[in-house]
Image (cartoon, coloured by chain):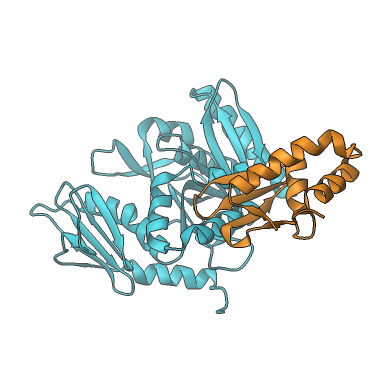
Chain colours: A orange, B cyan
Amino acid sequence: MNAVLSKFADNFSETAIDDEIVVMNLASGDFFSLTGTARAIWLLLDGTRDLAAVTAALAADYGAEPDAIGPEVADFVTELEAAGLIRRG
Amino acid sequence: MSAPRTPEQAMALLDRESRVRHGPVPHELGGRDCAPGQWLISDGRFLSRCPSGYGFLYERGHGVTVERPAVPDPAEEALWLGGSVHVAIAALNGLLPLHASAVAAGGRAYAFTGPAGAGKSTLAAALGGLGLPMMCDDTLLVDPLGPDPLVCLPGRKRLKLLDDALALSGAVAEAPVGVETGKVYARPPGGTVTVPLPLAMLIFLEDGPEPIWEPIFGAERSARLDDDHYRQAMVRAAQDEGRAGQFALRARVAGQVRMARLVRPRSPEGFAASVRLAADRIAAEGKD
């Protein structure tokens, strides 16, 4: 298993409004609105899954092939990491 | 953790904190100079100095001190006390002031918000002609320290309208405002509400070619709460909650209060149509 993806809980506040999750980076004040698959990935980042497991779970939820969605999931996870919202390991 | 304060407690607090006495007011607060036309908030206090020579100091627990210029103008004094000073007192006592005029329907409040000149007061007053009494004009105070659902307090400011808005809304002129605002104090045709009510909806007024009512969903509901930069800057200065606290407050409001855009043309016909549309949608919202 590769590095587990975990949220930096101290770095952000989040709230659900309708079908969206709004996340605010407490250091920068930047907002992130997560809908659709972005919201689904965010919810899968529960500190127990690595990138492959997140991709597999998302693929199962959406009836997709993990290989087909893998690059986009990886890109989004990298964005969250760059934004200081999650970490690997 | 203390129990949420009741709306009655919030109203009594506001009454107590809004008491006025006259006397000298400093020119600086918290080590910073307050130039004419500016305001400062520091350590539970608010200071504002006006170009006309008026000075206003509010100290939490001590009420408001007003320094009058050599030639006082009671009309101007009333405008400041009902405007910036009122907003500062609210913010320094944990209330969330929104730039909105509201009506009551079915025991809940429906608030119209938008920038100055958007027609908030005129629309809210005009809805009185369709049986919806007015809850507040220009400033709506929501109490985040109260219980759920979020409650807003009845307004303390008299309705002010321009002459053309009087004609559009059916409000009755009572007295000139007295300062060069071009407005008169007026009585809304549907009367006023004097009790706190749950806040059901925030409606954002926008200009457009035809009347449209469009619900606002998701993250935009949170983002829209930041539209009113002036009042929200005062809240940030007064409440010192940090980003997490501000976010939590916005999340609570956005999570409970429905929102919509009301787009309408700036014409008498468009205004009448938008009043009917708003009344219809508010009636429909009340049935949900």
The outermost residue toward the left is B70
Please give the name of the residue rendered at 67% of the width and 39% of the height, measured from the top-left corner: B281
Q: Is residue A76 left or right of B152 when viewed as pictured? A: right
Give percent across and percent down for residue B68.
14, 58
Give percent across and percent down for residue B4.
56, 73
Give B211 or B24, whichever is nearer the viewer. Answer: B24
Please give the name of the residue rendered at 74% of the width and 46% of the height, measured from the top-left corner: A39
**The N terminus of chain B: image quadrant:** bottom right
Give A55 or B193, whichever is nearer the viewer. Answer: A55
Please give the name of the residue rendered at 60% of the width and 26% of the height, measured from the top-left corner: B211
Give percent across and percent down for residue B112.
53, 43
The outermost residue toward the top is B209
Residue A34 in sight in this render: no
Give B29 or B97, whichever is nearer the viewer. Answer: B29
Q: Is residue B2 left or right of A5 when viewed as pictured? A: left
The outermost residue toward the front is A1
Give percent across and percent down for residue B242.
47, 60
Please give the name of the residue rendered at 14% of the width and 53% of the height, measured from the top-left corner: B72
Res B284 quadrant in image: top right
Residue B205 in sight in this render: yes
Q: Is residue B62 left or right of B167 when viewed as pictured? A: left
